[in-house]
């Protein structure tokens, strides 16, 4: 599945949060959206998964206009793990994951044995079967995030939109989740907070700053000390890691001198 976003623009009142954003995700790619807090990552993703309607711009999925597609059809094509995880009712974990099956059903359809099997497998994949009967609202942030990912998996779509899917997780779950998503062989567009995670898992990156795409390319081109300073205002040291072949970034506290690069350059 191929996603194409053209000239996407959105304002909250008079505050422009996404401005003329263009991006593309090809089938099978794992594409990261990075940028400082408030740079517009969630706004761009919400526009794509139809959580809000852009003021301007066009979005295509395999050449088809996403914004005029029936909601149910777009829900079948895109699985979403968003940032706002709060639900107003006391759903169990199993019920939350079963919601992933909703776009496959008509109103009043009951769960089939196949639906239940898919839900069970999704929970099992994420090591969550034990928690199936628990109240979702009483889980920790990290457990909630795994449930939302299980729900996306139960949906069986081959395009995942993720908004900082690991931001509540410790390093072992962060790695597990990204390794897991990689193995699903789906197409991914994900906002990622952690630049080293983005470097490890993404084929390509788009960098947002003040709602605009300011850089794009493979991690080794995008994640240079110069670019990181320009966008985040922090100094860093970057080397290609001998084992992963990916950029590995060390952030430098004030007082540490770098010979190879200074802010003035
Ligand atoms: P990011 O996900 O990169 O942190 P967001 O897309 O959430 O950025 O936010 C982009 C900008 O839009 C920020 O300045 C933020 O304060 C603003 N913003 C986000 N959501 C709302 C909202 N519901 N109402 C008003 N402003 C918002
Ligand atoms: Mg966000």
Image (cartoon, grey):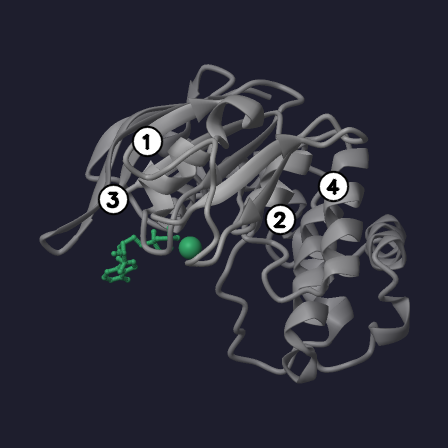
Q: Nearer the viewer, residue 242 or 216?
A: 242
**Sequence-earlier tag: 4 or 1:** 4
- Whether residue 188 is visible, yes or no, is no
Q: Which residue is mark 1?
A: 213
Query: How many residues crowd around disc 2 within 10 Å: few (fewer than 14), some, or many (20 or more)?
Result: few
Q: From this viewpoint, which residue is outermost toward the left?
A: 14
Q: CA distance from mark 2 to mark 4?
A: 28 Å
SS assignment at label 3: loop
SS assignment at label 4: helix
Q: Is mark 4 within 8 Å of ligand 2?
A: no
Q: CA distance from mark 3 to mark 4?
A: 29 Å
x and y percent of residue 68 in the render? 35, 31
Query: How many residues crowd around disc 1 within 10 Å: few (fewer than 14), some, or many (20 or more)?
Result: many
SS assignment at label 1: strand
The tag on residue 106 is 2
Q: CA distance from mark 2 to mark 3?
A: 41 Å
x and y percent of residue 42 in the render? 40, 50
Query: How many residues crowd around disc 3 within 10 Å: few (fewer than 14), some, or many (20 or more)?
Result: some
Q: Nearer the viewer, mark 2 or mark 4?
A: 4
Q: Nearer the viewer, mark 2 or mark 3?
A: 3
Q: Nearer the viewer, mark 4 or mark 1?
A: 1
Rendered residue at 56%/28% (across/down): 219
Looking at the image, residue 38 lies above or below residue 217: below
**Sequence-earlier tag: 2 or 4:** 2
Q: Which residue is mark 3?
A: 210
The quadrant holding residue 54 is top left
For the N terminus, give its image quadrant: top right
Q: CA distance from mark 4 to mark 1?
A: 25 Å
Q: CA distance from mark 3 to mark 1?
A: 9 Å
């Amino acid at each position: 599945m191929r996603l194409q976003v053209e000239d996407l623009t959105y304002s909250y009142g008079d505050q422009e949060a996404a401005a003329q954003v263009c991006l593309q995700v090809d089938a099978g790619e794992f594409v990261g959206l990075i940028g400082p807090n408030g740079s517009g990552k969630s706004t761009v993703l919400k526009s794509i998964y139809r959580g809000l309607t852009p003021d301007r711009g066009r979005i295509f999925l395999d050449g088809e206009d996403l914004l005029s597609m029936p909601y149910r059809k777009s829900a079948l094509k895109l699985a979403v793990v968003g940032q706002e995880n709060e639900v107003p009712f006391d759903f169990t974990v199993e019920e939350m994951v079963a919601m992933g099956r909703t776009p496959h059903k008509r109103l009043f359809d009951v769960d089939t044995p196949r639906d239940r099997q898919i839900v069970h497998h999704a929970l099992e994949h994420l090591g969550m079967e034990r928690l199936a009967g628990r109240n979702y609202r009483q889980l920790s942030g990290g457990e909630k995030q795994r449930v939302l990912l299980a729900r996306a998996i139960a949906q069986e779509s081959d395009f995942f939109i993720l908004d900082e899917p690991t931001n509540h997780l410790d390093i072992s779950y962060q790695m597990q989740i990204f390794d897991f998503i990689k193995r699903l062989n789906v197409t991914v567009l994900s906002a990622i907070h952690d630049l080293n995670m983005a470097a490890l898992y993404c084929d390509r990156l788009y960098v947002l700053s003040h709602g605009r795409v300011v850089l794009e390319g493979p991690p080794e081109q995008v994640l240079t000390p110069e670019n990181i300073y320009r966008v985040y205002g922090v100094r860093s040291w970057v080397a290609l890691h001998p084992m992963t072949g990916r950029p590995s970034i060390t952030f430098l506290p004030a007082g540490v001198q770098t010979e190879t690069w200074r802010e003035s350059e």
